[in-house]
Image: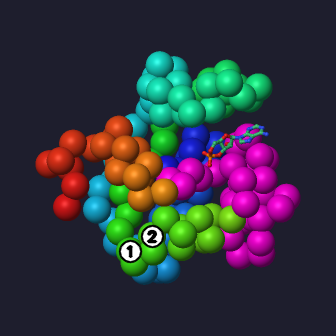
Amino acid sequence: MIKPEAMAAGHAGKILDLVLSKGFRLVSLKFTQLSEQEAGKFYEVHKERPFYRDLVNYMASGPVLAAILEKENAVQDFRALIGATDPAEAAEGTIRKRFAESKAKNAVHGSDSDENAAIEGAFFFTGREQY
Ligand code: CMP
């Protein structure tokens, strides 16, 4: 998912181009905006964290670009491509190093396991929206 601040800054095209150039195939793509309730559900695992409320408000603050991507080792390779959660700690050339504003506004989200990728994909896309 490309997050609201990166969308607002006009980084979506460059980020998507970079992702596709690294061999990820697009299965689904959607320009949409989460309600606070939906953002709260998407990030439910972080409910007890001190940043949860701010995270939910921010993720509902503007449109996002949600995608399902396919590749061998997709979860691991995508996480390597986006870099550390905090752009200050992200490696050179990673998406967060190039495009993220801060640890909270960090440009992109990537699923942390195949299991969560399936759950998060189904959150945004019906079966008929997956190709
Ligand atoms: P993401 O990969 O989408 O998963 C959870 C998100 O919570 C994370 O990216 C950040 O946007 C946010 N987050 C994680 N840790 C912090 C933190 N310490 N302070 C603020 N936001 C955080």
Q: Is residue 41 left or right of residue 11?
A: left
What residue is rendered at 19% in x and 61% in y? Answer: 131
What residue is rendered at 85% in x and 58% in y? Answer: 88
User: Secondary structure beneath disc 2?
Assistant: helix
* Residue bounds of the magenta highlight: 84-112
Q: Is residue 69 left or right of residue 61?
A: left
Give me the C-alpha separation between circle 2 and circle 1.
5 Å
Q: Which residue is mark 1?
A: 71
Q: Nearer the viewer, residue 74 or 22?
A: 74
What residue is rendered at 21% in x and 42% in y? Answer: 126
Going by the numbered disc 2, the residue's amino acid type is: Ala
Going by the numbered disc 1, the residue's amino acid type is: Lys
Would you identify the image quadrant in which residue 53 lies?
A: top right
Residue 68 spot, x, y in % from top left: 36, 57
Mark 2 and mark 1 residues within 8 Å of each other at the beta carbon: yes
Q: Which residue is mark 2?
A: 74
Q: Nearer the viewer, residue 5 or 81?
A: 81
What residue is rendered at 69% in x and 49% in y? Answer: 106
